[in-house]
Amino acid sequence: MERKIVIVQMKEELYDASIALSQFAFQYVRSPEEIERTKQQFLAEPAVKWAAIVDGKFAAQAAVFDLHTYIGGKRFAMGGVAGVATWPEYRRQGLVAKLLVHALEGMKDRGQSISFLHPFAFAFYRKFGWETYTEYKSYTIRIDQLPARQPINGRIERVSMEVSASVIGQLYEAYASKYNGTLARSELWWDYRVNKRKPGQTAVYYDNADKPQGYIRYEVKNSQMTIHELVYLNEEARSSLWSFIAQHDSMIERVTITAPSDDQLPFLLDNPRIQHETIPYFMARIVDVAAFVEQYSFEAADYEDHIVIAIKDEHAPWNNGLYMLGIAESGKASLAPYEYSAANNGQNSVELSIGTLTTILLGYMNILHLYQYGRVQGDESIINRLQNRIPERNTYLMDFF
């Protein structure tokens, strides 16, 4: 018998069904009080939540948070996919695929030209166009390996997040905007996500002019200091905050911290042989390639570029096809549909998938490397031309959803 499958937008009346599936799928248990608080968050956070209903029963779900990310120092509207889950009896029946395609259509309609998600399996989401875009370094440092304490020129003040929210928010945005793929945090995001997930102490570094230049958010427990966020705008702030960390040496045995992929802490230590690893983290996907390219800033040059690009996108047909990418001297670009003809069919194109294009434009992977790996096809000279117009910028994400 043919099943009836409908995709509906979740409202308050489906909250209980959603939280029941979430607790089962992600293996956690909430008290009645916590469930009520989570319900308020469910209703307050800007997001679109979708449910797959099969024969009248709640079978699967996915949420798309209304977020913004920095790319090239600009804010891009971003759809943050989260909470994807299916009851076991409905798995492997294509429900998640239906939800993701439905979510992509909704993101395009809402002007979210790019999407991020945290994968349970990278290979699974690659099938739907998402690709790895960022990683982070994880350090565990014994107290005898910490940077040597240095005299602090300014001052460090421990503060409450509530009192210093504007100061810390401004420091975070200045730091985050230097990377591709960081979140532009809203007040609600600070309240519901950052402050709840990253408990403990907060300290701000002020320089001699009494201007805030960095902060640290950390927790001390069981002889370990866990640094949730270390944000600094210059070397003075970085070294001063590390000196502050070392002041805790009488009460801790080790420090754990995560850092962006371009962090060079081991090089700066007397003993660089600290425990550290690099961990692939989030995936990204361009939702609307024409809208994304229009906002994206390529490298400026004293010439224009016109490059034919063949994009493969099985799940977002509005992206799939052949395009002319025009890049002005200023770096502003546009993407227009293109057709081969007898006059131009000798013009080579760059061929790649939407996921590959995403990871290239965000700066996580170099197009020439992907060409060598067979993930990009085309004339090498044209690929070189395109690489020369893609800005070099590291990716980072300090958040989770």
Image (cartoon, rainbow, N blue to C red):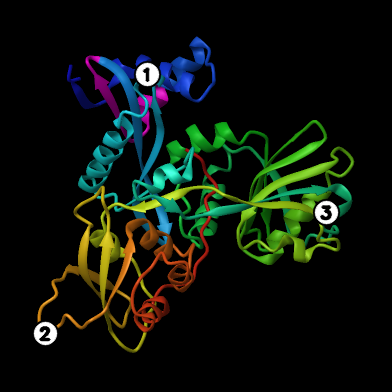
Label 1, on which residue? 89
Residue 166, magenta (yes or no): no
Disc 2 designates what residue? 343
* Place of residue 343 in the rendered image (x, y in percent of width and height, measured from the top left): 11, 84
In the rendered image, residue 50 lying in the magenta stretch gets the answer: yes
Number of other residues with Cα within 10 Å of mark 2, as a class: few under 14, some 14 to 19, many 20 or more: few
Assess disc 1: are there few (<14), some (14-19) or many (≥20) residues with their C-alpha within 10 Å of its C-alpha.
few
Could you tell me if the residues under marks 3 and 1 are in contact, i.e. CB atoms within 8 Å? no
Q: Nearer the viewer, residue 392 or 309?
A: 309
Q: What residue is drawn where x is 45% and y is 67%?
A: 370
Describe the element under mark 3 as helix, strand or loop: loop
Q: Residue at x 53, y 12 (%)?
A: 31
Residue assigned mark 3: 146
In the image, 338 versus 237, the foreground residue is 338
Q: Residues within 10 Å of mark 3 (few under 14, many from 20)?
A: many
Picture residue at 46% right of the left edge, 55% below the top = 181
Q: Give the mark nearer the N terminus: 3 vs 2.
A: 3
Residue 291: percent from the left, percent from the top? Answer: 24, 59
Amino acid marked by disc 1? Glu
Which label's residue is closer to the chain start, 2 or 1? 1
Seen in the picture, residue 258 relative to 386 is either above or below; the reply is: above
- Residue 118 location in percent, x, y? 47, 42
Q: Which mark is first along the chain, 1 or 3?
A: 1
Q: Amino acid at mark 3?
A: Leu
Q: Is residue 83 above or below residue 286?
A: above
Q: CA distance from mark 3 to mark 1?
A: 51 Å
Q: Is residue 170 visible?
A: yes
What range is drawn magenta here?
A: 40-56
